[in-house]
């Protein structure tokens, strides 16, 4: 009797072969602004593809190359390395107008993007009405979230509400017109309720739609593209935006962004399976900052806040808003290690602490009822009344910006890093000591 093959559907053995390449997620472990852009830029050198997996133009990743500064909002930070393929996954909400502004500005500055940028066919479009709704809703809210006003929340609401417009819809004018018309009707009604005029909407929509063909020409299916690359032995970085404490599920809800910033979002946000991911590097600043509303348990006293803000240049790359600053919070970094399954951490901005005679690290929180916890509470509201339990460590009071090897760091700087590693429960793999590409210390 001839036997029926069990897997007769597989035409191509490659489809079931394990991937030979390497896939690493880079994720922020605090409230964003940890310096992910710099770490992604440095690590991009050794990879073939860099893909963004969530968020939109609310991100502002600052990268310094030589004397030039680039602020990347939607295009992955790997774009500054020649030849790397840069993808925007299905998890992003793509603002067409802003995307092409950024694209064209990079080309103008001499970056060759030919064939290098791909956009998921499944990505949601962020359209002008999302921005209008965002600003109007935040203006009218009693509990302000401190959004960037870039339309991110409303675009994700449309996605979850199953009424969003996706990149692929740009290829079907009839479907596109239906989706846009019903969205406009809904939005105008809502804006009317909020007392906001819609005068400029039609012109802005026309401008966005005129870019549709151009966007379609860059569209791709990011999941299969990344999977094929991994099977072919290539290396891939998945770049997170914002940070763990801003994750929709695991952050300080409701003072969060509207997507899953954490590492698991890298799989759903690009279209690969979680087993394709080999490692997860968490980026932590050597201290803590937060922009927007919401609690910051380890916040500095006002004078120190101002001092460190100036030392670290802590002003938002997207909005220019001053960031609140505080001591390193290991309750949060342990939460990040747990939620993201960190395999290692990259500590940034160590140099910013060079002049401080003494440092503190939050090791636990004293809760309003007097109990002490070393795990990150789910109750965001309790975070505004917790009292961090601090451990004091001596500063190193010496410059570190020139250091390129771990053993050349001042002893107290190494002790500080050792303590962050112990408290975070994740190994330090990279230490960044300045904005420049070469100001990085790899740790074996
Ligand atoms: P991202 O959104 O996580 O990429 O972070 P941002 O770009 O908003 O903020 C990081 C800022 O810190 C940028 O201006 C970087 O150039 C800068 N930066 C990154 N790493 C270092 C570092 O090790 N030392 C110093 N002094 N600045 C750094």
Image (spheres, helix red, strand yellow):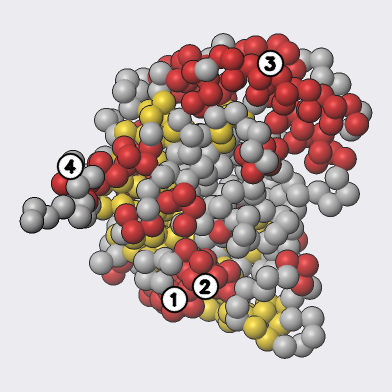
Q: Residues within 10 Å of mark 3 (few under 14, many from 20)?
A: some
How far apart marks 4 and 1 lie (CA) works out to 42 Å
> Measured from the top left, where is residue 312 in percent x and y?
56, 52
Select label 2 or label 4 by which is in front.
4
Select label 4 or label 1 by which is in front.
4
Identify the secondary structure beneath mark 1: loop
Select label 3 or label 4 by which is in front.
4
> Measured from the top left, where is residue 204 in percent x and y?
68, 16
Earlier residue among tags 2 and 4? 4
Earlier residue among tags 2 and 1? 2
Query: To which residue does mark 3 refer?
Result: 204
Q: Residues within 10 Å of mark 1 (few under 14, many from 20)?
A: many
Q: Residue furthest left?
A: 1
Name the side, left or right, on which 160 lies relative to 24.
Answer: right
Can you say which quadrant of the picture contains the N terminus? bottom left
Question: Residue shown at 38%/34% (left/top)?
Answer: 221
Query: To which residue does mark 1 refer?
Result: 425
Query: To which residue does mark 2 refer?
Result: 334
| Residue 49 visible in image | yes
How far apart marks 2 and 4 lie (CA) works out to 43 Å
How far apart marks 2 and 3 lie (CA) works out to 44 Å
C-beta proximity under 8 Å, tags 4 and 1: no
The part of the image, by quadrant, that contains residue 428 is bottom left
| Residue 358 visible in image | no
Query: To which residue does mark 4 refer?
Result: 12
Identify the secondary structure beneath mark 4: loop
């Amino acid at each position: 009797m001839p036997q029926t093959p069990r897997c007769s559907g597989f035409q191509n053995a490659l489809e079931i072969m394990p991937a030979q390449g390497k896939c690493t997620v880079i994720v922020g472990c605090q409230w964003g602004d940890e310096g992910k852009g710099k770490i992604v830029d440095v690590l991009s050198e050794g990879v073939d593809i860099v893909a963004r997996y969530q968020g939109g133009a609310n991100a502002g990743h600052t990268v310094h190359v030589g004397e030039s500064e680039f602020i990347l909002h939607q295009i992955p930070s790997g774009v500054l390395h020649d030849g790397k393929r840069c993808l925007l996954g299905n998890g992003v909400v793509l603002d067409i107008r802003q995307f092409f502004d950024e694209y064209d500005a990079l080309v103008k500055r001499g970056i060759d993007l030919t064939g290098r940028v791909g956009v998921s066919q499944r990505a949601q479009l962020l359209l002008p009405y999302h921005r209008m709704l965002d600003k109007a809703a935040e203006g009218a809210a009693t509990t302000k979230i401190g959004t960037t006003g870039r339309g991110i929340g409303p675009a994700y609401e449309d996605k979850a509400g199953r009424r969003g417009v996706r990149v692929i819809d740009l290829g079907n004018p009839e479907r596109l017109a239906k989706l846009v018309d019903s969205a406009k009707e809904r939005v105008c009604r809502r804006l009317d309720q909020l007392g906001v005029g819609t005068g400029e909407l039609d012109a802005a929509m026309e401008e966005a739609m005129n870019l549709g063909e151009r966007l379609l020409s860059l569209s791709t299916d990011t999941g299969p593209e990344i999977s094929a690359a991994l099977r072919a032995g290539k290396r891939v970085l998945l770049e997170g935006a914002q940070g763990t404490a801003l994750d929709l599920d695991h952050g300080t809800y409701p003072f969060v962004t509207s997507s899953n910033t954490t590492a698991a979002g890298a799989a759903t946000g690009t279209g690969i399976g979680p087993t394709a991911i080999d490692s997860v590097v968490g980026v932590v600043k050597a201290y803590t900052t937060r922009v927007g509303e919401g609690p910051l348990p380890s916040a500095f006293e006002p004078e120190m806040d101002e001092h460190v803000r100036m030392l670290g240049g802590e002003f938002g790359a997207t909005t220019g808003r001053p960031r609140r600053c505080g001591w390193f919070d290991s309750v949060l970094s342990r939460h990040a290690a747990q939620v993201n399954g960190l395999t290692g951490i990259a500590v940034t901005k160590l140099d910013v602490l060079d002049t401080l005679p003494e440092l503190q690290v939050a090791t636990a929180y004293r809760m309003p009822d007097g109990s002490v916890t070393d795990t990150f509470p789910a109750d965001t509201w309790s975070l505004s009344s917790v009292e961090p339990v601090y451990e004091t460590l001596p500063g190193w009071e010496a410059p570190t910006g020139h250091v390129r090897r771990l053993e050349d760091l001042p002893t107290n700087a190494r002790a500080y890093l050792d303590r962050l590693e112990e408290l975070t429960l994740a190994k330090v793999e990279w230490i960044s000591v300045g904005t420049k590409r070469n100001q990085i210390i790899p740790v074996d």
